[in-house]
Image: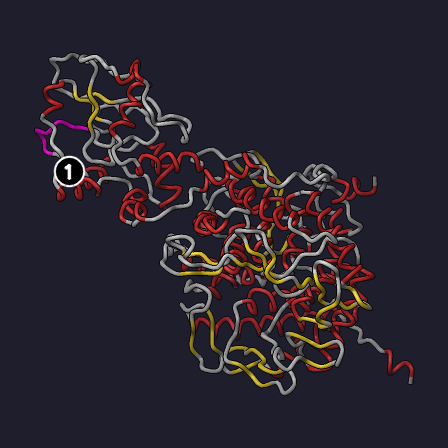
């Protein structure tokens, strides 16, 4: 009798593979239903068999499911969908979106797909993984979110308009997770592109939260990002707070920041002291630690998996058994479970196909190979198959007590739930590589080893290969944000004649000195000032120009300025924009290919008798008399001239950028660096904190970013 009570099913390799294929079929049914009934909407409605936009009207489920296709080996469909996604050149749309959700789902999904694309046979651009269309698309989205961080505390707003920035009247109250869940995606973006902006604003937001913790070390649920005042002071590890703690650990490992691990360890001690009750976690006041809500939230199920990343496997196993007992009680975990009554909360009794429990089971099975975890995973699979499956996908369980369905299938079902289930039953998947083999690739920084495992999942289960971040850690060559804002400064000048006069004064020695009798025009051949925040005031000496000095004029108010100031020779076959400028501006930001002379002539037709003038330069009139005859162009002529500008500048001018206050990311970054509002953590160089007991981490990476082979590990 005792044997029958304590028996744990033994799983053969064939049994595990059979479960894996069942999960694959589950994913395929949901994915095909989305494409058939819901695309291009954000999400599938599995009861109505149609689609609906939820988070941003950008085909969310398709992007969220991309890396799941790669992990399951469906490379053909992955490549097809990538080409479909890349038809969207940018995310310039007049819609309000959640900063948090857009980051974890869209940016995370694009970055992961970018890093996995080499496995699928997708044609890679030169310089990959430090370059590529998916990476540029991810950066485009991130750049649109940056304005949310332009607050007095450095903590971001919760909502952003993808075209115009923070919406008027937007509340300044954001949940803790909405502030502290950026370092994985933004850190990855900075390491790949070489632009420090993203990592620094995300890191600054984390430091802001740490700075605003209570005297006993707890964090509340919601905070005012302009004042730093906590508006919801309940402390816990569940909804509204969860991924902040998750990203402290994952950010520390991915970016090798020991101070983040130290911040987590501090928080862990306080959580265990005030919130932990018999391997359950409750909610308490952040100021005194008095219990306010003795409940378990389904979102808290990530915690055992997080503990496994730092080697706390025994503690994690005790907690996971508690959480699984709730699943066995209802067949699902309700959003809120009352620990006092032992029942699902009457107002939060749904299960929206959440992945957190299966996520922790997957992590713990990878560490322990305990077969009881496979049994837990199969329980979850059976429940979903039995009660959530519909003809058109899988539906949210509206009430775990009677398993009624709700007409929604969130994108994370394909991004997370099915992915973690698949990885649980596929122990040989490349994601689980313990560091015994890798791949050598060539990058702009030389040879690099990738695919050695140690993938870090963001909170939407999008895996990031940390080795690829090392490949691109050196600043990439090419345009940086300072150059972009140098362009913006030119555009914002009400009258840039003064600006160009300053340029001329700084480069007078390099202006071509042609004869006054020659009726041809000459061109400035030096670069723009290197610093964007230089004062535009002109010294008295510069104002007192002699009559012999050339007078600078332009074709319109904005001026056709050669952006990097390089000299353009007046030859018959010369292109109007230099290859350098095209590569740095058009190709990088607008995906415009460098064209030859034939394409130039198409947009800039010239008559045979007409003097060939490189109009995208500063035109220097040799004769002051001729300068007086220069007339202000008509409106029609100005519009025609506008079409001659690069596309990136055209679109910028056509928007209402002058009528609204704009966030300047470079200035914001400089302000963060200058203010140093939050002091450096004392453990910033304490790298031993990263040496956790988790064996998988020791097999991944050394503190210097080098790879450990088996012999080195033994030593």
Q: Is residue 486 above or below residue 160?
A: above
**Residue sitting nearer the eye, 48 or 509:** 509
**Residue sitting nearer the eye, 382 or 617:** 617
Residue 497, quarter of the rendered image: top left
Q: Is residue 140 left or right of residue 689?
A: left
What residue did someone put label 1 on?
A: 605
Counting from the top left corner in percent of width and height, residue 144 is at 43, 50
Identify the magenta region. 607-613
Residue 681, quarter of the rendered image: top right
Q: Is residue 527 left or right of residue 474?
A: left
Q: Is residue 569 above or below residue 290?
A: above
Tell me the quarter of the image containing the C terminus. top right
Q: Is residue 128 left or right of residue 689?
A: left
Counting from the top left corner in percent of width and height, residue 433 is at 69, 53
Q: Residue at x 38, y 56 (%)?
A: 88
Q: Does the magenta segment cover residue 609? A: yes
Q: Say whether residue 211 is visible.
A: yes
**Residue sitting nearer the eye, 552 or 696:** 552
Farthest right residue?
2
Tell me the quarter of the image containing the N terminus. bottom right
Is the stretch drawn in magenta largely helix, strand or loop?
loop
Counting from the top left corner in percent of width and height, residue 95 is at 39, 61
């Amino acid at each position: 009798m005792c044997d029958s009570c304590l028996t744990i099913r033994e799983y053969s390799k064939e049994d595990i593979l059979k479960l894996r294929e069942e999960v694959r079929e589950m994913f395929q049914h949901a994915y095909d239903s989305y494409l058939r009934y819901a695309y291009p909407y954000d999400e599938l409605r599995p009861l109505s068999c149609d689609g609906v936009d939820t988070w941003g009207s950008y085909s969310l489920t398709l992007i969220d499911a991309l890396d799941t296709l790669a992990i399951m080996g469906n490379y053909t469909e992955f490549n097809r969908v990538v080409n479909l996604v890349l038809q969207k050149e940018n995310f310039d749309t007049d819609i309000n979106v959640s900063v948090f959700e857009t980051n974890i789902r869209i940016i995370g999904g694009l970055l992961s797909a970018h890093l996995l694309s080499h496995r699928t046979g997708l044609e890679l651009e030169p310089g990959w993984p430090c370059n590529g269309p998916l990476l540029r698309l991810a950066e485009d989205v991130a750049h649109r979110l940056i304005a949310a961080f332009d607050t007095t505390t450095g903590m971001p707003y919760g909502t952003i308009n993808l075209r115009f920035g923070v919406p008027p009247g937007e509340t300044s109250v954001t949940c803790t997770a909405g502030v502290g869940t950026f370092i994985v995606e933004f850190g990855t973006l900075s390491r790949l592109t070489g632009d420090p902006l993203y990592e620094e604003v995300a890191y600054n937001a984390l430091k802001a939260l740490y700075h605003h913790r209570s005297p006993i070390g707890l964090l509340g649920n919601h905070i005012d990002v302009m004042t730093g005042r906590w508006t919801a002071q309940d402390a816990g590890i569940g909804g509204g707070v969860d991924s902040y703690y998750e990203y402290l650990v994952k950010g520390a490992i991915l970016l090798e920041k020991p101070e983040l691990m130290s911040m987590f360890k501090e928080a862990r001690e306080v959580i265990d002291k005030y919130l932990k009750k018999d391997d359950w976690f409750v909610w308490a006041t952040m100021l005194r630690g008095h219990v306010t809500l003795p409940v378990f939230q389904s979102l808290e199920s990530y915690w055992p998996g997080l503990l496994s990343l730092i080697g706390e496997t025994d503690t994690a196993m005790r907690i996971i058994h508690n959480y699984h007992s709730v699943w066995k009680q209802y067949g699902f975990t309700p959003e809120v479970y009352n620990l006092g009554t032992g029942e699902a909360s009457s107002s939060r009794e749904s299960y929206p196909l959440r992945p957190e429990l299966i996520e922790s089971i997957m992590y713990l099975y990878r560490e322990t190979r305990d077969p009881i975890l496979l049994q837990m995973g199969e329980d979850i699979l059976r429940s979903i198959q039995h009660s959530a499956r519909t003809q058109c996908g899988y539906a949210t369980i509206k009430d775990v007590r009677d398993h009624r369905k709700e007409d929604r299938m969130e994108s994370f079902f394909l991004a997370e739930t099915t992915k973690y289930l698949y990885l649980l039953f596929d122990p040989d998947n490349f994601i689980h590589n313990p560091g015994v083999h890798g791949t050598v690739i060539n990058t702009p920084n030389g040879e690099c080893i990738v695919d050695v495992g140690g993938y870090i999942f963001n909170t939407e289960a999008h895996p990031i290969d940390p080795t690829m971040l090392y490949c691109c850690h050196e600043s990439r060559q090419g345009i940086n944000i300072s150059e972009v804002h140098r362009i913006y400064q030119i555009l914002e000048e009400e009258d840039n004649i003064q600006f160009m006069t300053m340029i001329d004064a700084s480069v007078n020695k390099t202006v071509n000195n042609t004869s006054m009798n020659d009726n041809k025009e000459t061109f400035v051949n030096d670069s723009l000032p290197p610093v964007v925040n230089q004062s535009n005031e002109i010294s008295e000496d510069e104002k007192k120009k002699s009559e012999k000095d050339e007078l600078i004029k332009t074709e319109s108010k904005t001026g056709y300025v050669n952006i990097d100031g390089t000299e353009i020779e007046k030859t018959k076959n010369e292109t109007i924009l230099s290859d350098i400028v095209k590569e740095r501006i058009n190709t990088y930001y607008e995906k415009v290919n460098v064209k030859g002379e034939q394409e130039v002539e198409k947009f800039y037709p010239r008559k045979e008798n007409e003097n060939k003038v490189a109009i995208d330069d500063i035109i220097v009139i040799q004769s002051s008399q001729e300068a007086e005859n220069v007339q202000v162009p008509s409106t029609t002529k100005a519009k025609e001239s506008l079409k001659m500008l690069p596309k990136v500048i055209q679109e910028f001018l056509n928007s209402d950028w002058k009528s609204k206050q704009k966030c300047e990311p470079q200035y914001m970054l400089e302000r963060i660096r200058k203010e140093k509002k939050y002091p450096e953590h004392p453990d910033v160089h304490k790298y031993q904190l990263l040496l956790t007991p988790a064996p998988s981490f020791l097999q991944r990476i050394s503190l210097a970013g080098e790879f450990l082979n088996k012999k080195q590990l033994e030593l």
